[in-house]
Image (cartoon, rainbow, N blue to C red):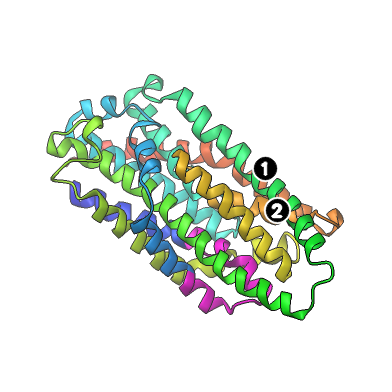
C-alpha cells in the first residue's frame, strides 16, 4: 500500500500541474510576452526548483493541521494508506471535471476537501480539526484572492502613475520583468503545491513505519525531501503537458490583459503566495492569480470584465470543498469494500 500511496500521490501532483500550470503563465502568454510553449517550459522548470529549494511549513499543515493524524494512524498502516489513496483519488476526480470545463478552480482545496470527506467517513466528524480548517483553509480561501485583487488594483495604479511618461524603453523593461515574475510565481506555486501532496503521502506512509504525527517530517525510513522533489517533478510534467487548457480562461476570457497588467498581476500573486508559504497556509495559487487578474481588470474599466465567466469561476470555488469532500467520502467507502 505504501508504494500505491506514492504512485497515486504523484499522479495527483501531475493532475494538479495540468490543472494549474496554464494559470501561472496565462497573462504572460495572452499579453504576447512569451510564446505558450516557452512559458510552460519555464513554469515547469520553476515548479520543480520551488519544490526542492523552498520551505516545508505547508507540508506540516497538511500532516497535522487539517485532520487528526492520531485518529487516522490509530487504525494502522492499512487505514492510513487507504486514507491517503482515497483522498488523492477524490481530489483528482473533481480536478479533472473542472479541468475539462476550463474552470480555474482550486486543486489545493479539492485535495483538502477530499481529505476532510475521507476522514469524516472513516473516523467521524471529530477527526477533522475544524478550528484549523476554518482559519487556515476557509478564511485563507476568502482572503487570499481578495488580497490578490487589492494588490493588483493598487499596484497597477501605482505603476501607471510612475510610468505615465515612460517611453518604449520602459515597455521593454516591463516585459523583461514579467518573465522574471512568471518564473518566481511558478517557483512559489511549485513549493506550495508539492508540499501539499507530499504531506498527504507522509501521512499515509507514517503508520507503515511505526511513526506518529510528531515524527512525520523526520522519519529516517521516509525521505521526505525526496518525495517532495518527486511531487515537484510530477507537478512540472503536468504543467508542461496539460497546462494549456486554462490559459484562455484566465488570460483572456476574464479580461483582456496587456503587458503592464500582466506584470502587475504576476507581482501581486507572488507577494500573496509567498506570504502564505511562510505562514504555512495551503492556499490556492489559482484563486490568487484569478483575483489579481480581476484586480488589474477593474482598475480603470470594470465593464471590460466578463462577469458571466467570473460567476462560473466563483461557483466552482464555492463548490470545490464540499464536492471534493463528498467525492472523497464515496471513494474511501468503496475502497473499504475491496479486500486487500
User: Is 4 on the left-hand or right-hand side of 305?
Assistant: left
Instruction: Mark yes or no: residue 338 visible.
Output: no
**Numbered-mark total:** 2
The residue where tag 1 is placed is 146
The quarter holding residue 265 reads bottom right
x, y percent for residue 187:
46, 60
| Quadrant of the snapshot with the C terminus | top left
Query: Mark 2 highlights which residue?
Result: 152
Quick check: is 162 in the magenta stretch?
no
Mark 2 lies on a secondary structure that is helix
Residue 64 drawn above or below residue 99: above
Q: Earlier in the sequence, mark 2 or mark 1?
A: 1
Q: Is residue 254 left or right of residue 213?
A: right
Of residues 225 and 173, the one nearer the viewer is 173
In this view, the residue in front, 216 or 321, is 216
Residue 136, how many percent across, how many down?
50, 33
Is residue 29 highlighted in magenta? Answer: yes
Task: Identify the magenta region.
Answer: 18-42
Image spot of residue 317 (x, y percent): 60, 44
Which residue is located at x 67 percent, y 53 percent?
A: 292
Point 23% across, 30% down: residue:
73
Relative vertical location of residue 261 with respect to residue 136 in this rendering, above or below:
below
Q: Residue at x 26, y 43 (%)?
A: 202
Of the two numbered discs 2 and 1 in the rendering, the one whose residue sits closer to the viewer: 2
Other residues around mark 2 within 10 Å, as few (<14) / some (14–19) / many (≥20): many
Amino acid at each position: 500500500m505504501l508504494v500505491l500511496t506514492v504512485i497515486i500521490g504523484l499522479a495527483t501532483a501531475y493532475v494538479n500541474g495540468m490543472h494549474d500550470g496554464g494559470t501561472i503563465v496565462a497573462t504572460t502568454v495572452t499579453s504576447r510576452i512569451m510564446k505558450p510553449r516557452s512559458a510552460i517550459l519555464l513554469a515547469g522548470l520553476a515548479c520543480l526548483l520551488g519544490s526542492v529549494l523552498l520551505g516545508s511549513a505547508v507540508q506540516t499543515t497538511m500532516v497535522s493541521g487539517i485532520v487528526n493524524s492520531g485518529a487516522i494512524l490509530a487504525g494502522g498502516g492499512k487505514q492510513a494508506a487507504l486514507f491517503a489513496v482515497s483522498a488523492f483519488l477524490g481530489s483528482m476526480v473533481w480536478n479533472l471535471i473542472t479541468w475539462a470545463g476550463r474552470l480555474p478552480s482550486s486543486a489545493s482545496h479539492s485535495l483538502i476537501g477530499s481529505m476532510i470527506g475521507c476522514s469524516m467517513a472513516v473516523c467521524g466528524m471529530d477527526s477533522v480539526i475544524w478550528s484549523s480548517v476554518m482559519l487556515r483553509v476557509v478564511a485563507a480561501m476568502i482572503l487570499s484572492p481578495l488580497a490578490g485583487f487589492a494588490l493588483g488594483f493598487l499596484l497597477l495604479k501605482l505603476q501607471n502613475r510612475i510610468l505615465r511618461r515612460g517611453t518604449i524603453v520602459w515597455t521593454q523593461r516591463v516585459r523583461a520583468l514579467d518573465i522574471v515574475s512568471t518564473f518566481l510565481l511558478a517557483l512559489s506555486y511549485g513549493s506550495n503545491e508539492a508540499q501539499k501532496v507530499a504531506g498527504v503521502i507522509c501521512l499515509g506512509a507514517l503508520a507503515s513505519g511505526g511513526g506518529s504525527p510528531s515524527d512525520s517530517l523526520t522519519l529516517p525510513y521516509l525521505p521526505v525531501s525526496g518525495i517532495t522533489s518527486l511531487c515537484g517533478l510530477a507537478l512540472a510534467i503536468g504543467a508542461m503537458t496539460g497546462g494549456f487548457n486554462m490559459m484562455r480562461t484566465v488570460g483572456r476570457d476574464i479580461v483582456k490583459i496587456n503587458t503592464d497588467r500582466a506584470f502587475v498581476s504576476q507581482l501581486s500573486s507572488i507577494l500573496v503566495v509567498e506570504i502564505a508559504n511562510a505562514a504555512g497556509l495551503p492556499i490556492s495559487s489559482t484563486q490568487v492569480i484569478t483575483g489579481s487578474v480581476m484586480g488589474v481588470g477593474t482598475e480603470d474599466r470594470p465593464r471590460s470584465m466578463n462577469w458571466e465567466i467570473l460567476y462560473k469561476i466563483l461557483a466552482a470555488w464555492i463548490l470545490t470543498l464540499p464536492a471534493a469532500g463528498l467525492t472523497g467520502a464515496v471513494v474511501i467507502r468503496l475502497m473499504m469494500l475491496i479486500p486487500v
